[in-house]
Image: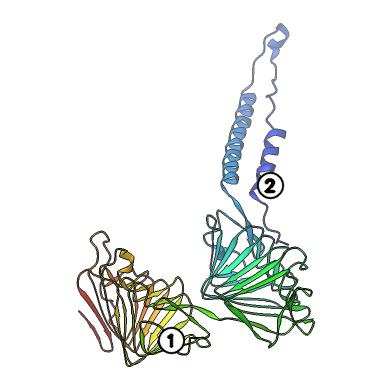
Amino acid sequence: MFRTGKQSDCQAYIRLRTLLFTETPKPPTRRYSARAATGGHTETMETNQLFKRNYATFVVLFIALFALSQQVQAQEKYDVAIAGTWITSENCNDLSVIPGVSGTVSYDAENRILTLKNAKIDGGSANAIYSQLDGLTVKVAGSNNLTSAYTSTIQFTKPMSIAGGGTLNVENPQGDAIYANKTSLIVDACTLNAKGGNYGIVGEDGKNGEKLTIRYATVTAEGKNDASIGCFAYLTIVSCAISQPAGAAFDTELHGIAINGELVKEKISIDPTVFQIWIAGKPVTIKNCENLSVMDGIEGTVKYDPRTKTLTLENATINTTKYYGILNFIDGVTIRLAGNNTIISENNNAIYNNDDCVLNIVGDATLKLQGATESKDKASRQALQNHGLLTISGCTIEASAGINGLSFGEWKFDRCNIRTKASGDEKYEFAGSMAYMSKIPTFVAAPSLPPQAHSGRSSTTNTAPATRS
């Protein structure tokens, strides 16, 4: 299943140990002088030199053995392999060094999280991901592509989850895309596309308690020869629905998604009915997304298009006492502005963008953000808290809050006008109007040096033309 690599440290350790204890230097041979006939003898200089050489060799080998044994003991192998190479304590922080792997791939052993961010893994004749670890989570951010030939692209023998705001594309033209080997899979709030020559997503035989759970996720599966989703004992769908093909459902006797007594081999689409975005504390759903202004605290035009991931605010006001004005856990959302818009949260952030999510705010319009100023929870005293990549394009934004205005994550300012003000905090040196950003912001039509983050004063960025206060 795995590629043959170089001789392991453990094998080298065994060979060196054998060398030491089977080829130990023998006691030096003595050559006797003429005095031997009377019972006396003398050692030649050659004998002494031979002893010294052998003794030195033994010392060097002993030191090498000790160092190698320490290295073997220090390196820990985890029960997960990438493209045929086991993850260890030495390579886990950067798995892109493995042949066939590119992008950001890392493993957190303490929390059992394998992170893929804009990654590509070509397993070749091995699984792109193989796991014997109970409770592994594959966290996806951005767009990720996994492929293998013949053997399944992803195979696991213990329960595993795929989660995150990103997309995971898994393909195998001759075999199975995802193989739950007598175990269970959870697909949680991400986008998963599985396409296989035999199966898209498959269990062992549906008689070993295999369970597939899909919740708040977008999933497509296609299996050309056998079935798109099959060999599972159970299928649980939470806040999702099978949208394609019409009439498809899980068949307990066939152990897969079927129509008219036959397993489906064409593309199956499962789409969320509740989306990972909340407005004034209320979730956006397939039922309310076309008119969100019916919710308490919302006025004007607010609507969400799940097909394009576009949230439209037109002369809208969102006002909440304790919730986030907008809480986003979806990668690739665009907030499209028209007219004059206001988001106010008395005890929380006006907008919160979750880890690794790309969020765009666009439109020739204005948006005023007011975060908490006196909330007991200091983390709530922020106007726009971003932990992904946020682009503001073509609009005017005014943001204010008690501690941070625009904070964390990556930022791109594209021909926009930004004014932000926050008072900072004496316990946090870098708190302020523009604070804790993970990288220097990108400015389009802006000065080469961005405004410095500072406490207690406003920061203005105008990228067309560029000014700075």
* Rendering quarter of residue 109: bottom right
In depth, the one of 396 and 300 nearer the eye is 300
Residue 316, how many percent across, how many down? 34, 88
Q: Residue furthest top?
A: 38
Q: Secondary structure at mark 2?
A: helix
Callout 2 touching callout 1 (CB < 8 Å): no
Q: Nearer the viewer, residue 254 or 167?
A: 254
Quadrant containing the N terminus is bottom right
Residue at 79%, 74% in the rendered image: 253
Residue with the mark numbered 1: 292
Q: Is residue 168 visible?
A: yes
Going by the numbered disc 1, the residue's amino acid type is Leu
| Mark closer to the chain start, 2 or 1 | 2
Count neighbours of disc 2 (C-alpha within 10 A) and say few if under 14, some if 14 to 19, many if 20 or more: few
Toward the viewer: 135 or 172? Answer: 135
Question: Residue beneath label 2, please?
Answer: 11
Neighbours of disc 1 within 10 Å: few (<14), some (14-19), many (20+): many
315, above or below 441, in the image:
below
